[in-house]
Image (spheres, rainbow, N blue to C red):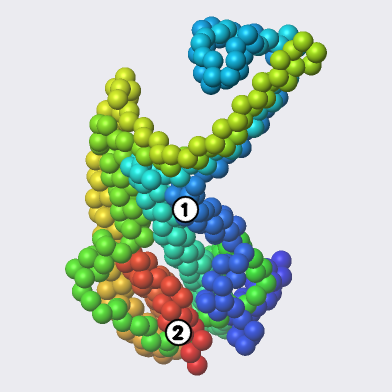
Amino acid sequence: MLMKKTAKASVLLLSLITSQAHALDLLEAWQAARAYDPQFAAARAGAEAGRTKTLQAQALKSPQVTLNAGMAGVNSDNKISNAQFSNAQFAGGGAGASGTTDFRTRTDAGLNLNLNLRAEYPLYDAARNGSVEQLNKQAQIAEVQLTLDEQQLMQRVAQAYFDTLLSADTLSTLKSQQAAVAEALASAQTRFKEGDVAVIDTHETQARYDLLASQVLEAESNLQLSRAALADVTGNQDAALVPLPQKAKLPSIASGDLQSWLARAQSSHPLVHAQQLQQEIAHTESGKFQAKYAPVVNLVALAGGDRLQGLSGNDADVTNRQMSLGVQLTIPLYSGGMREARYQEALALEDKVRNQTDYVRQQAAREARTAWLAVTTGQGQVKALEQAERSAEIKLDSTRVGRDVGDRTTLDVLNSEQELYNTRLALYRSRYQMLLAQINLSASAGELGEPRLQEINQLLTAK
């Protein structure tokens, strides 16, 4: 059963870290995720919706044209008393006569038809202008949010990619250690039969082998889970991955000290940019209600009319037509305190957003500080672990020689091997963590993009 598990793991590991000519590198994984990831697809749709805010802003500045038409059955009885007339001829009067008369129109069963076309163009409206500005800034926020989502996708892809490589390295290291222990176990059993070593050496070696067998099974499971997590982002289930060469020279930290990174994070982080736009929107909202008597001036054109048509012979027919073009002035004199209440609300919300902006700046600085320290500390850790790996290799060689001459036991060799492999795994983990920290540092300053990802990817594809 163990041989079958080992063979299965070997095939999976081989598919992940070999055939580099056809393997998926970090940049290709990002490009696949950009086209496949459902979370980023939702972000793109949100950005597209945000772009329509610009069209809405343009619409607010454009003329508004409405057409109203109606038809209704009515009963109508209109009476006008003492209507004056002149220069007209009425019953009983000649030309040039003048005086007063009564008029009455009555329709017991009629049909009222009306049709009106109204065009309105804003000449001055502070609230409308503020809404235009707010809509344009909301469109900008949508673009900033898409940039943030794109950076976060890069971080998720890099995390999943390096997690998979680390899982593969862990499995490979454990299998190498298992092979070494299996060789030591066979040697201990042979030497025990020959009477060269005590039975305790065989038991200790067997116990170490059994422990490694369980660790290999766990590593196989972790590798499959890491691979599935990467596939969830990229949609690629079976592609091999380009590994990080063991002798790859990791890049040093980008130019600039901690303070420069903090300053860039507080000014250029996408969340900070988006929050600044939100603050400007809140300020515009308070400005819309600041003036107590804010006039609204519109250019209005109107054309239309209505007709009351009687349906019987005794019913009157009445037709009205009108056309007009003029300027309409509207001044809110009293709104029951609503305008003042809206103004006070907008001021409070503006203060809230201002404080939120300060908090987001603190968060951005915290992210930058954490990533910067991870990069600088990681550089020292990688160098220290590289030296520790060389020292552990020398120690293992010396321990094996000591065992051959009788100064060291098989357990001493197993412990030296364990120390070497633990150091090697720590080195692998530290290298991946440092690369991720560099990606996170660039993201904290709003500088993460394909060029930065390409720099990391070159380490994978370098000969």
Badge nearest the viewer, 1 or 2: 1
State the image quarter where residue 268 is shown: bottom left
Q: Which label's residue is closer to the chain start, 1 or 2?
A: 1
Amino acid type for the residue under numbered disc 2: Leu
Kind of residue at disc 1: Gln
The tally of labels here is: 2
Residue 378, image x and y in percent?
31, 73
**Residue at the spot x=21%, y=70% of the render?**
260
Measured from the top left, where is residue 326 in percent x and y? 43, 39
Q: Is residue 177 left or right of residue 20?
A: left
**Residue where numbered disc 2 is placed:** 459
Residue identified by numbered label 1: 58
Residue at 54 percent across and 71 percent down: it is: 30
**Relative depth, front residue between 153 and 339:** 339
Quarter of the N terminus within the rendering:
bottom right
Q: Is disc 1 in contact with disc 2, using a CB cutoff of under 8 Å? A: no
Measured Cα–Cα span from mark 1 to mark 2: 48 Å
**Dot 2: what SS?**
helix
Front residue (pair 286, 363): 286
Q: Is residue 232 left or right of residue 108?
A: left
Where is residue 292 drawn, in percent x and y? Answer: 25, 31
Q: Give the vertical position of 240 relative to 118 (above or below).
A: below
Q: Residue at x 36, y 35 (%)?
A: 329
Rendered residue at 49%/47% (across/down): 63
